[in-house]
Image (cartoon, rainbow, N blue to C red):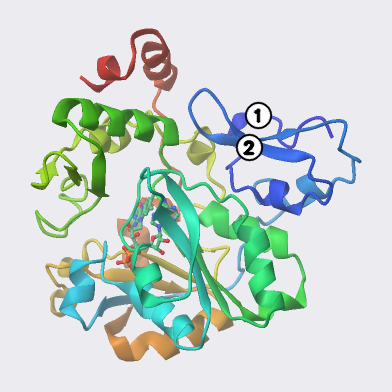
């Protein structure tokens, strides 16, 4: 196998190929934009074809459910959970069901250098670290293999991630009977930003403010929860200035300039009402127009129940939520990523050329 993918738009960086390679011939390496891609050690490759056969981008149907999802507007009954969640706290309600049955949760967390990677949680405290959207592509490392290990030991597992990561997990699991105890939850995903630009941004904040960053938070509810404010409220502290500061330049690069997302996001195969997951969570933006009584200024989740397993999970977490079923048309109208990928910026390459030539500060101003 010379290459696992033909062009960058065809690789979402989920790491399924890396995890599935029985001969350890594949390594995930960052490109010049900081996104991970598989590279093949030809001396180890036995050309079995497993890596390409399970790739969620090229697999016919992309491991998506064929049934039509049911859609709910929901918010957690606990005010504390609402404050500490991005939207309406759906992730906490869903993951509590699994933790309550001695299960394991996998989701995106920060390491000690505030890099984003997938982590394993067995306790509510470990799970709480996964709360809040991190607008950086998470490094999956050996998550899929770890999940299989947990399933083999009879544990129930909930995996949460972007739509392509959940599809990658489905590809990796194949028809394994172990998947019976695996629950998969994805997010409606705008697109996923570059880990390299995230590193640059953290360094810039440290240079400007002095000291080392000790905490960061995207999507704080400092300005309230609304679509309008979803690109505001990034908070951080450094060890030299413990007062909480706010800065929105990373959001501007992500949502405004729109140049720092992974190339494959512009051709996302998962921007669809049919999902490669049992349950999908997102922001129920616009709920105030359709059902004012379901609106809450601290956030409302959109929950899509995509499969029988998803329905089973949803029924078990419902008691922690104020919830109502809503028509799909509302979500199709409000959530463009349910029908089409995010648009690629026409001169995206200019951003990256300027970055390479003049550095990060130049492209930030
Ligand atoms: C990159 C990105 C793009 C998004 N785009 C949209 C969008 O276009 N429309 C929309 O309505 N919602 C979007 N969301 C989802 C939304 O922001 C909330 O994450 C979601 O509603 C869950 O909120 P909550 O209150 O239930 O959970 P929270 O408690 O906030 O839980 C966060 C959940 O998100 C997961 N997560 C966080 N960061 C990452 C990451 N980098 N990679 C993988 N998983 C991650 C965690 O594992 C956890 O399961 C996006 C999220 C991310 C990370």
| Element on which disc 2 rests | helix
Q: Nearer the viewer, residue 19 or 320?
A: 19
Q: Quadrant of ligand 1?
A: bottom left
Relative to residue 17, is residue 267 depicted above or below? above
On the rendered structure, is 127 left or right of 5? left
Where residue 223 sits in the image (x, y, percent)? Answer: 9, 54
Where residue 61 sits in the image (x, y, percent)? Answer: 67, 57
Where residue 2 sits in the image (x, y, percent)? Answer: 81, 30
Q: Nearer the viewer, residue 99 or 348?
A: 99
Q: Is mark 2 within 8 Å of ligand 1?
A: no
Q: Is mark 1 within 8 Å of ligand 1?
A: no
Q: How many neighbours does mark 1 have within 10 angstroms: few (below 14), some (14-19), or many (20 or more)?
A: few
Relative to residue 294, is residue 50 depicted above or below? above
Whether residue 116 is visible to the viewer of this picture, yes or no, is: yes
Give the numbered dot on residue 10.
2
Q: Tally the marks.
A: 2
Which residue is drawn at the image coordinates 10% and 55% (left, top)? 222
Quadrant for the C terminus, please. top left
Task: Evaluate if marks 2 and 1 touch, with contact meaning CB atoms under 8 Å apart.
Answer: yes
On the rendered structure, is 230 left or right of 340? left
Where residue 44 sits in the image (x, y, percent)? Answer: 86, 37
Q: Quadrant of residue 78?
A: bottom left
Give the numbered dot on residue 357.
none
Relative to residue 234, is residue 181 depicted above or below? below
Relative to residue 116, is residue 292 depicted above or below? below
In the picture as drawn, the residue positioned furthest to the top comes out as 357
| Element on which disc 1 rests | loop
Q: Quadrant of residue 343?
A: top left
**Residue labelled with disc 1:** 7
Q: Nearer the viewer, residue 10 or 86?
A: 86
Quadrant for the N terminus, please. top right
Whether residue 327 is visible to the viewer of this picture, yes or no, is: no
């Amino acid at each position: 196998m010379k290459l696992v993918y033909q062009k960058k738009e065809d690789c979402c960086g989920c790491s399924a190929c890396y995890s599935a390679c029985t001969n350890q011939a594949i390594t995930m390496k960052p490109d010049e934009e900081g996104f991970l891609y598989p590279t093949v050690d030809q001396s180890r490759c036995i050309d079995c074809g497993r890596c390409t056969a399970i790739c969620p981008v090229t697999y016919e149907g992309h491991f998506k459910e064929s049934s039509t999802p049911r859609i709910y507007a929901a918010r957690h009954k606990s005010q504390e959970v609402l404050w500490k969640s991005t939207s309406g706290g759906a992730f906490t309600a869903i993951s509590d069901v699994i933790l309550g049955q001695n299960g394991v949760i996998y989701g995106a967390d920060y390491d000690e250098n505030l890099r984003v990677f997938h982590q394993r949680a067995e306790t509510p405290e470990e799970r709480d670290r996964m709360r809040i959207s991190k607008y950086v592509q998470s490094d999956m490392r050996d998550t899929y293999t770890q999940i299989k290990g947990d399933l083999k030991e009879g544990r129930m597992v909930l995996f949460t991630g972007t739509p392509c990561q959940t599809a990658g997990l489905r590809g990796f699991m194949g028809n394994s009977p172990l998947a019976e105890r695996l629950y998969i939850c994805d997010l409606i995903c705008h697109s996923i930003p570059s880990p390299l630009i995230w590193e640059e941004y953290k360094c810039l904040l440290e240079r400007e403010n002095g000291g080392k960053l000790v905490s960061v938070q995207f999507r704080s509810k400092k300005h309230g929860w609304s679509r309008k404010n979803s690109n505001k409220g990034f908070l951080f502290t450094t060890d030299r200035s413990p007062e909480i500061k706010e800065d929105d330049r990373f959001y501007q690069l992500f949502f405004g300039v729109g140049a720092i997302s992974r190339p494959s996001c512009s051709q996302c195969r998962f921007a669809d009402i049919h999902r490669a997951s049992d349950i999908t969570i997102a922001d129920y933006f616009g709920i105030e127009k359709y059902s004012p009584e379901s609106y809450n200024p601290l956030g409302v989740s959109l929950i899509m129940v995509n499969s029988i397993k998803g329905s089973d999970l949803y029924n078990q977490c419902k008691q922690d939520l104020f919830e109502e079923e809503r028509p799909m048309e509302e979500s199709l109208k409000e959530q463009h990523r349910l029908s089409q990928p995010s648009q690629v910026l026409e001169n995206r390459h200019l951003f990256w050329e300027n970055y390479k030539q003049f550095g990060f500060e130049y492209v930030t101003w």
